[in-house]
Amino acid sequence: MKKAFFYTLILFWTIFASAQDYLYFGFGGSYFNFEDSTKYNHVLIDSTEIWRIMKPDKDILFLPDQPHYFGERAIITNTSQYYPAEVQASFQFKLFIIGGTDIYNIAFWHKYDFNTNVDGGIIETSWDYGATWQNIIFDSIIQENLWEGGAQNMYTLDDTISSLNNQPGFTGLNAEGMHVNIDFWASYAIDTGELDTLLLRFTIKSGELSSNHEGWLLDNFSFGGTLVGVEEINKGSKLLSIYPNPANDVINIKLENENINCIAIYTITGQMIRKYIQTNFLNVHDLKPGVYLIKVNEKYTDRLIIK
């Protein structure tokens, strides 16, 4: 009887997930926050009523007033002050993979407050429409193709959560908020079109005892990609000098055997956000933390990490 119920639940979830609207994943990509309610069909929330889209107003889990890209709403665990004991709840995105992209990027901003190593949150992936899931740090398609600089501000194998059978995940306290960036090269399966959909799921799990912790808040998701050939990156890294890198203030750009005429900074999704003419000192203090591409004289490319 229990087995029949389990398979019925899986079937229900698969049918329900198939009705979810896609977000595009690749060059140009998709940006998703929670300000426009007409786009909520892009996020699938389970029926536990733990995850809510709302204006966060807890002691730790609230959105900062600045910078300007934060709105009023985010997705957050529970409307009460603390998450309950013995709960497991998820929400997910359905990403349609755009071919022809060299590097894929998953990024979001979040805060969390969990009972350390007991409760926590994990990111899960499925490449077969939800038939099987894995913790993202055990996903070979992503982890074996991480771009240099790889996954920033992610959890590690040491960040275990006992209520999730000691799986690694986000646990403890992150009160200030931070950006998570995961950048990986397209694998053979993605290049050939063998894989066309990625389900990305965010799951919270708590133990048997209530612990007076606030849970998890997430916002400002982006799923992008960029066209940066291996040869171009290698050529750029040999001829370009960027100091300091990682950076958070002013950087100095040097180019061997050639004058610098123009410098452009691109997001990992391929959007140009800055352009400079005949200068090699760039002020980057107002860039969000993450991985960017710097292109000099429209032909030499290297990466820049903002911390």
Image (cartoon, helix red, strand yellow):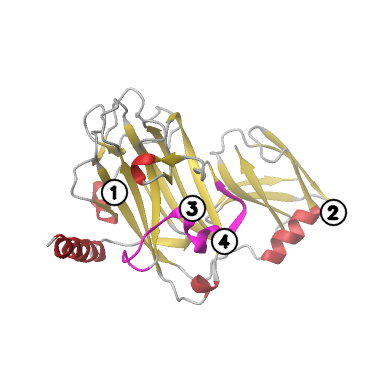
Which quadrant: the C terminus?
top right
Residue of label 1: 90
Residue at 38%, 40% in the rendered image: 162
Q: Where is residue 143, by image quadrant?
A: bottom right
Compare marks 1 and 2 and give the one earlier in the sequence: 1
- Magenta extent: 128-151
Q: In the displayed structure, would residue 184 be above or below residue 170?
A: below
What crowding class fits label 2: few (fewer than 14 Cα within 10 Å), some (14-19), or many (20 or more)? Answer: few
Query: Where residue 28 appears, x then y in whole percent?
Result: 48, 59
The alpha-carbon separation of the residues under discs 2 and 4 comes to 36 Å
Compare marks 1 and 3 and give the one earlier in the sequence: 1
Residue of label 3: 137
Compare marks 4 and 1 and give the one earlier in the sequence: 1
Q: Where is residue 305, by image quadrant?
A: top right
The alpha-carbon separation of the residues under discs 1 and 3 comes to 18 Å
Residue of label 4: 144
Compare marks 2 and 4 and give the one earlier in the sequence: 4
The amino acid marked with disc number 4 is Glu
Is label 2 in a helix, a strand or a loop? loop
Is label 3 in a helix, a strand or a loop? helix
Residue of label 2: 258
Residue at 61%, 33% in the rendered image: 285
Which quadrant: the N terminus?
bottom left
Q: In the displayed structure, would residue 66 be above or below residue 226?
A: above
Viewer-nearest residue: 149 or 126: 126
The amino acid marked with disc number 1 is Ser
**In the rendered structure, are the residues bearing label 1 and label 2 in contact, judged by CB atoms less than 8 Å apart?**
no
